[in-house]
Image (cartoon, rainbow, N blue to C red):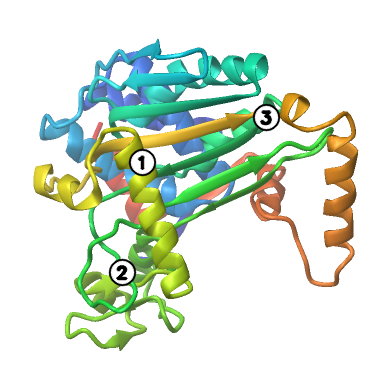
Amino acid sequence: MNDVIKIKLDEIKMLVTEVLQKQGCDIHNAKALAETITKAEEDGASSHGLFRLPGYVASLKSGKVNGHASPKVKNITPVILQCDADNGFASTAHEKALPMLAEAAKTNGISVLSIKGCYHFAALWPETEYLAQQNLVGVACTAFKPSVAPAGAKEAFFGTNPISMAWPRKNNFPVVFDMATATMAKGEVMIAARDGHMLPDGVGLGENGEPSNDPKEVLKGVLLPFGGYKGSAISMMVELFAAGLTGDVFSYEAQENDNNDGGPPSGGEFIMALNPEIIGDSSWEKHCEDFFQKLLSIDGVRLPGSRRHKKRSNDEYRSVNAELLSKVKSFL
């Protein structure tokens, strides 16, 4: 069923908050995650919005996730912060830790946050864009359970391992990219399977190890890294940053520890904030804006994130898959 229903963003946020409270979250955790989900729907990132809610609910029902999490943040040094997410959803940890990360970068020029024991199932741009709104450069990455074959292989080892960067612009939306190091995010493949769309070449292999454009076959098989060996190397870098540096689990360890309830596995996240006011010189803002304008003068070019930001500026209604909306309401 591919019918869609128009629904207001405020209704989405209220519905998600109610569902999460009904399924085991306290009001603080429910509101934090509802905000993240609603932001995804607002920006047209449907693969990371309501589509993820059944997985979040499954994690609460199985007892894997702590719906009453109270994250704790400590300063290891003035620029190194560690957050224990208390086995809660990443959104709650972000709400507590990101303001502290931003303040440290504003004072010292750079700061790094490692989050351990969180369940990250959302887009990455909310973290980095938050930092850009503080006039900071934000970088974030996190690993996941294996679903991507390293270059040259046919067996999953890496997660989709997304990475995001946001760059501040005065009186304008920041430049933001948020991308899986797989050729396509798994959620997008799942939506293609749901809606009956074929995939472009190079997304993944079927169960038999051969290239396939059928999303259902790719979901039985394995995704591929973008750009072959180059994407594979970046995916490995994400593993090292999000697990090696944070001290949390690599993708294969996440798989070994997970109960496979359909929700996210426990893992780590690496977030870095840089202050161009301290690192750069007094002309950094104009210099970078000149660069962006020069780039935009090339026919056919748009800045990363601009399509989402344009969608954000539209009306308050969003189109939601009717079958998904019915499933979400069944959780009440």
Which secondary structure, mark 3? Answer: loop
Q: Earlier in the sequence, mark 2 or mark 3?
A: 3
Q: Nearer the viewer, residue 320 or 64?
A: 64
Image spot of residue 291 (x, y percent)? 85, 52
Image spot of residue 134 (x, y percent)? 68, 24
- The mark found on residue 242 in the picture is 1
Q: Nearer the viewer, residue 164 or 275?
A: 275
Circle 1: residue type: Ala
Task: Give the spatial CA distance, label 1 vs label 2.
Answer: 17 Å
Circle 2: residue type: Pro
Q: Earlier in the sequence, mark 1 or mark 2?
A: 2
Which secondary structure, mark 1? Answer: helix
Q: Is residue 3 visible?
A: no
70 is higher (above) or lower (below) than 193: above
Query: Which corner quadrant of the image does residue 257 belong to?
Result: top left
- Which residue does the image show at 61% across and 21% down from the upper left? 105
- The mark found on residue 136 in the picture is 3
- The mark found on residue 150 in the picture is 2
The reply, left or right, for residue 162 in relation to residue 294 is: left
32 is higher (above) or lower (below) than 245: above
- The mark found on residue 15 in the picture is none
